Image (spheres, helix red, strand yellow):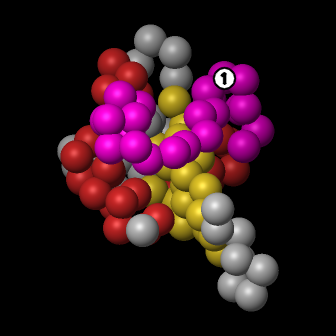
Amino acid sequence: MDKIVVLFTMKGCPHCSELKSMLIENELDFVERDIHEHHDEYEIFTQVTDSEYVPAFMIINNDEQNPSSKLFAPSRDFNTLQEGVDIIKKEII
């Protein structure tokens, strides 16, 4: 797989649970990172995006010729969970 979706979530967050369910329903693979367990990673994410909202996600392109990552935060890059799913579909397909 050349692209990896990293999903930042928080226990007890209904929007996080719903987005995970939507990704599973759409057969979109992701790696989940709870913001309390992976605080250092999430801290970097929030500094770059200037957003602390979850669920948020990062898409990593592991292509050896062109490695890159894109960060997506709610209210900044998408307003609904469906928009988030659509972004992920567009980016990884």
Residue occupying the far bottom of the picture? 65
Position above or below: 69 against 53? below
| Residue 80 x %, y % | 21, 45
The quadrant where residue 77 appears = bottom left
Q: Is residue 68 left or right of residue 25?
A: right
Q: Is residue 45 left or right of residue 57?
A: right
Observer-nearest of 47 and 11? 11
**What quarter of the picture does the N terminus occupy?**
bottom right
Q: Is residue 33 left or right of residue 18?
A: right
Residue visible at 59% across and 34% down in the picture: 32
How far across and how far down the image is residue 39, in percent?
A: 71, 32
Task: Give me the residue at 40% from left, 57% from top.
Answer: 88
Let me know if residue 30 is in the magenta part: yes
Please give the name of the residue rendered at 63% of the width and 33% of the height, measured from the top-left corner.
33
Residue 60 visible to an observer of this rendering: no
Q: Is residue 29 left or right of residue 39?
A: left
Asked whether residue 52 appears in the rendered view, the answer is yes
Write down the residue under mark 1. Answer: 36
Q: How many marks?
A: 1
**SS for callout 1:** loop
Which residue is at the front of the view, 71 or 61?
61
Q: Magenta part of the protein: which range?
A: 19-41
Q: Amino acid at mark 1?
A: His
Q: Quadrant of the C terminus?
A: bottom left
Q: Quadrant of residue 3?
A: bottom right
Residue 27 among those drawn in magenta: yes
Against 15, residue 88 (above or below) is below
